[in-house]
Amino acid sequence: MAEPDRRKVICLVGAGISTSAGIPDFRSPTTGLYANLEKYHLPYPEAIFEIGYFKKHPEPFFALAKELYPGQFKPTICHYFIRLLKEKGLLLRCYTQNIDTLERVAGLEPEDLVEAHGTFYTSHCTSQLCRREYSLGWMKEKLFSEVTPKCEKCQSVVKPDIIFFGENLPPRFFSCLQSDFRKVDLLIIMGTSLQVQPFASLIGKAPLSTPRLLINKEKTGQTDPFLGMMMGLGGGMDFDSKKAYRDVAWLGDCDQGCLALADLLGWKKELEDLVRKEHAHIDAQSGSSTPNPTSTASPGKSPPPDKAEKPQ
């Protein structure tokens, strides 16, 4: 008898899955990245991630990069939940907006990932004639010696391979979505405001029969049906209308949402054990035992999802 097809789950994730690791999101009013950039004297907050501004004034970005450097953080419960999906043969792909590399630290392979907004994992010389590649270790050394990273070959500025406003998304983003979204049979969206295009449009690429679960602090991805039709932004989330049939919102902390889902799947102890084991391994490598700022390696009993909402 033929083995039944495995589920094909796509995760779409944003900054909200990394906040419990101490990495700020972008748009929270007081704690978000954009609300805390006064010291860099930028013309407007987004300038720190604009390629035109970076080419003239790279220093603010590198000062911020040192603060946000990935090596200072541990993956969260969300990251390890995605790792469990992979280990169980259920993960088709994880599309991430994050540049913190925590998906890789948690055990996802490059093949499992589409790093839609690039990554700190590699860096390149910004000169089109050179484009020499540099490693994460090389970039870390430059950042922490507070030297603007310059190419050893041509002395142009070296930039981590993250996508700035004004740059194209990686070719892999477009090639993977063409095939992945034809096959997906569950979409899990976590920790993203779905405000940045074209990433936000991915929710509309799944077949109309594919269930979509949002784990987030607030509902997002909803579009006015008429506006969506006019602008070609079909497929917005619909949690509440009488026609709602496939979208579910679990509102609250992303780590707690993943624990609640793991509990329903019978994986909660396995997830907690994985987090504990992996964090201990990271501590042993770094010689410290600091838990993530707002989550622990041994998560307690998750509260019931009292704000979970689903179509009637």
Image (spheres, rainbow, N blue to C red):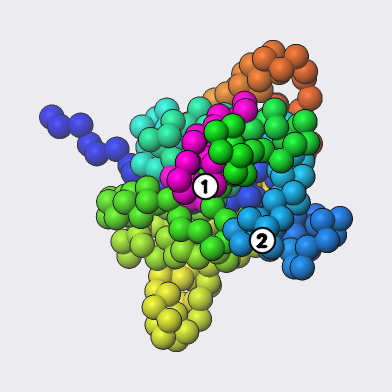
**Relative height, residue 135 to residue 130 (above, below):** above
Determine if residue 38 is in view: yes
Which of the pair 125/228 is nearer the observer? Answer: 125
Residue identified by numbered label 2: 53
What residue range appears in magenta? 114-138
Structural crowding at the residue carrying mark 1, measured as other residues with C-alpha within 10 Å and reported as few (<14), some (14–19) or many (≥20): some
Q: How crowded is the residue under tag 2: few (<14 C-alpha within 10 Å), some, or many (20+)? A: some
Extreme residue toward the left, this view: 1
Residue 40 % position (x, y): 82, 56
Look at label 2 and name its amino acid. Tyr
Kind of element beneath mark 1: loop
Q: Quadrant of residue 47?
A: bottom right
Vertical placement of 219 versus 62: above or below? Answer: below
**Percent coordinates x, y for residue 309 in the rendering:** 57, 61
Relative placement, left or right, of 228 versus 288 is left
Which of the marked residues, 2 or 1, is nearer the chain's N terminus? Answer: 2
Residue 144: x and y in percent read 76, 31
Query: Is 125 inside the magenta-drawn segment?
Result: yes
Name the kind of residue labelled 1 in the image: Ser
The correct choice, above or below, for 62 with respect to 4 in the image is: below
Residue 259, can we see it?
Answer: no
| Left or right: 177, with 278 as reference point | left
Question: Residue 250 occupies which quadrant of the picture?
Answer: bottom right
- Between circles 2 and 1, the one closer to the viewer is 1
In what element is the residue under mark 2? Answer: helix
Measured in 3D between alpha carbons, the distance from the residue under mark 2 to the one under mark 1, in whole angstroms, is 16 Å
